[in-house]
Amino acid sequence: MRILISACLLGTCCRYDGGGNRQEWVAELGQRHELVPVCPEQLGGLSTPRPPAERQGDRVVTSTGGDVTAAYEKGAAETLALAKLLNCQAAILKERSPSCGRGTIYDGTFSHTQVPGDGVTARRLLEAGIPVYGESQVPQAFLDLEGADL
């Protein structure tokens, strides 16, 4: 199965602060499935490093007050186009991100307060019918993806 995965989870230094979020389970996942790394923020034209951003309703704003909604929307569109082009059947994305977050994101106050919601890219993939998992759901995702007829 071909799976989109947040590039930062592979250890790619593409986070807003220039770091990565390497996860040990990625190697095992890569032995079972073909992984397609993506960073929607970079696909949307944002640099690394960049100011932290959070969702505020339908907008995405930086901690310095800049509106980066257009870049996040472009990154989501590019990620969806890639998913369709490569026939990706699922996505595993970085939790709490304003782009990739699935189920929980930060509330837009930059106070580390979490609220229910999805990032811009996660929402776009879900609307297109692509299952999206956060990295803490990977053990369950293994079970779902192994037996699923996707």
Image (tube, grey):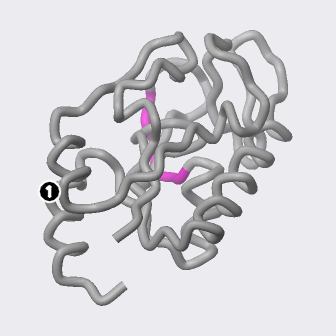
Where, by quadrant of the figure, is residue 50 drawn? Answer: top right
Rendered residue at 29%/27% (across/down): 22
Amino acid carrying mark 1 in the image: Pro
**Could you tell whether 79 is left or right of 68 in the image?**
left
The boundaries of the magenta stretch are 113-118
Which residue is identified by label 1?
139
Rendered residue at 38%/53% (across/down): 35
Up-down relation of residue 99 to residue 10 (above or below): below
Coordinates of residue 95 in the picture (x, y in percent): 40, 41
Q: Looking at the rendering, in which quadrant would you find the N terminus?
A: bottom left
Rendered residue at 24%/32% (across/down): 23
Q: How many marks?
A: 1
Q: Of residues 29 and 41, which is closer to you in this image?
A: 29
Up-down relation of residue 120 to residue 80 (above or below): above
Up-down relation of residue 9 to residue 37 (above or below): above
**Could you tell whether 1 is left or right of 111 in the image?**
left
Q: Of residues 148 and 55, which is closer to you in this image?
A: 148
Where, by quadrant of the figure, is residue 128 drawn? Answer: bottom right
Coordinates of residue 88 in the picture (x, y in percent): 49, 68
Q: Of residues 101 and 36, which is closer to you in this image?
A: 36
**Could you tell whether 124 is left or right of 34 in the image?**
right
Identity of the residue furthest to the bottom in this view: 149
Asked if residue 147 lies in the magenta stretch, the reply is no
Coordinates of residue 120 in the picture (x, y in percent): 65, 50
Q: Of residues 137 and 36, which is closer to you in this image?
A: 36
